[in-house]
Image (tube, helix red, strand yellow):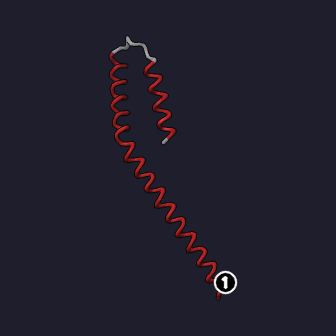
């Protein structure tokens, strides 16, 4: 996420440095880019939340697997 945000910031700086007298084709491309970035901005919180939830699920699963492995090792020793 931080890499994506960094790239967007860099692109924004580059766009601000463009000369004000741009041709219409470039203006159209910039407008499309701006719309896409705005859509991405709207989606990022949901993506971030989903990634955090998945991380929590994976950490929980890892803890469960570690516990099961420890139990299996312990039960082999008692046999």
Q: Which quadrant would the C terminus be assigned to in this image?
A: bottom right
Determine the image quadrant of residue 12. Answer: top left
Secondary structure under the numbered disc 1 in the rendered image: helix
Q: Is residue 25 found left or right of 7 in the rendered image?
A: left
Count of all numbered marks drawn on residues in the image: 1
Q: Which residue is drawn at 50% across and 40% down?
A: 2
Name the one closer to the observer, 52 or 21: 52
Q: Is residue 17 left or right of residue 72?
A: left
Position of residue 59 relative to residue 65, above or below, is: above
In this view, the residue farthest toward the right is 77
**In this view, 17 is above or below 72:** above
Disc 1 crowd, CA 10 A, few/some/many (<14, 14-19, 20+)? few
Horizontal and vertical percent position of residue 43: 36, 42
Residue drawn at (47%, 24%) of the image: 13
Residue ranking furthest to the top: 21
**Residue position for label 1:** 77
Estimate the x, y position of residue 66 in percent, counting from the top left. Answer: 58, 69
Residue most extreme to the bottom: 79
Residue 3 coordinates in the image, percent (x, y): 51, 38
What's the residue at 37%, 37% (across, down)? 41
Q: Residue at x 42, y 47 (%)?
A: 48
Q: Which of 24 and 8 is in front in this view?
A: 8
User: x%, y% of residue 40?
Assistant: 37, 38
Which corner quadrant of the image does residue 16 belong to? Answer: top left
Q: Is residue 11 above or below residue 47?
A: above
């Amino acid at each position: 996420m931080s890499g994506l945000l960094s790239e967007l910031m860099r692109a924004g700086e580059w766009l601000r440095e463009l000369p004000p007298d741009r041709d219409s084709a470039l203006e159209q491309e910039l407008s499309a880019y701006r719309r896409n970035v705005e859509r991405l901005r709207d989606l990022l919180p949901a993506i971030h939340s989903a990634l955090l939830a998945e991380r929590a699920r994976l950490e929980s699963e890892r803890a469960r697997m570690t516990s099961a492995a420890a139990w299996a090792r312990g039960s082999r020793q008692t046999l």
